């Protein structure tokens, strides 16, 4: 992510960013209820709400975010919740120091903020970090205008996942700003 966007995201965490609702979405709760605990990685974890929910349900959970203020807040929230979780200040496109594979990789609103080169690096990391048979839960919203430079993805940005993952479910909807959005559950084939 380029410096101006990083700066803006970090400034948001001095206040209350609109995306940080402190509520774990029902899609993640449903996944937790339907699957045995394992190792989970939340890419773009913000202040750790979903990592904490996973840890409360016996998952070995790690959260990654490039905003130091968000990670400090996530660590405080985890201590207050009495859960053990790991939080790292890192860019989701540069995860070379993370080696162990995960049963679940979660992304609620990170991928759709990356440029095309960032998306390519992200997918390489995902392929390396997701165990065979593992699940990838992704929430994205779409640009209102495909030619727009605003955040969000276009449908073709999802095509790169189909070369490495199988789509399990897709739920289309809209976000609070009435942009089209999707919840996608992918699974990495057992090889």
Image (cartoon, helix red, strand yellow):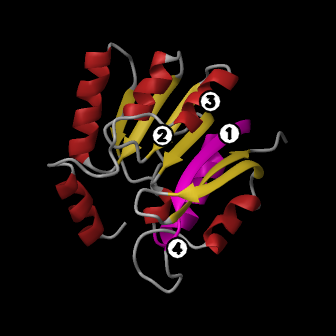
Rounded to the nearest whole Å, what is the CA distance between mark 2 and mark 1? 12 Å
Rounded to the nearest whole Å, what is the CA distance between mark 4 and mark 2? 20 Å
Q: Residue 99 placed where, x, y %?
A: 55, 38
* In this rendering, the label closer to the viewer, 2 or 3: 3
Q: Residue 33 placed where, x, y %?
A: 63, 22
Residue 42's disc is: 2
| Residue on which the image places disc 1 | 135
**Magenta residue span:** 115-143
Residue in the image at 71% along x and 47% along y: 186
Is disc 3 placed on a helix, strand or loop?
helix
Total label count?
4
Rounded to the nearest whole Å, what is the CA distance between mark 2 and mark 3? 16 Å
Residue in the image at 61% along x and 35% along y: 104
Residue 116's disc is: 4
Of the numbered discs 4 and 1, the one sitting upstream in the chain is 4
Of the numbered discs 2 and 1, the one sitting upstream in the chain is 2
Is disc 1 placed on a helix, strand or loop?
strand
Residue in the image at 21% along x and 63% along y: 7
The answer to whether residue 71 is above or below residue 124 is above
| Residue on which the image places disc 3 | 30
């Amino acid at each position: 992510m380029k410096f101006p966007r990083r700066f803006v995201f970090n400034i948001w965490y001095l206040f209350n960013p609109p995306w940080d609702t402190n509520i774990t979405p029902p899609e993640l709760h449903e996944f937790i209820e339907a699957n045995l605990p394992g190792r989970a990685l939340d890419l773009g974890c913000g202040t750790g709400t979903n990592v904490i929910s996973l840890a409360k349900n016996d998952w070995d959970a790690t959260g990654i975010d490039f905003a130091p203020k968000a990670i400090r807040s996530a660590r405080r929230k985890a201590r207050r919740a009495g859960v053990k979780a790991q939080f790292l200040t890192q860019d989701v496109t540069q995860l070379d120091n993370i080696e162990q594979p995960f049963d679940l990789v979660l992304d609620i609103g990170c991928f759709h903020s990356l440029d095309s080169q960032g998306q390519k690096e992200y997918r390489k990391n995902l392929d390396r970090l997701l165990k065979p048979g593992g699940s990838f839960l992704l929430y994205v919203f779409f640009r209102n205008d495909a030619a727009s430079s605003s955040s969000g993805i276009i449908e073709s940005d999802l095509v790169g996942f189909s070369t490495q993952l199988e789509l399990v479910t897709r739920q289309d909807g809209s976000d609070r700003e009435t942009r089209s959005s999707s919840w996608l559950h992918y699974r990495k084939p057992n090889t």
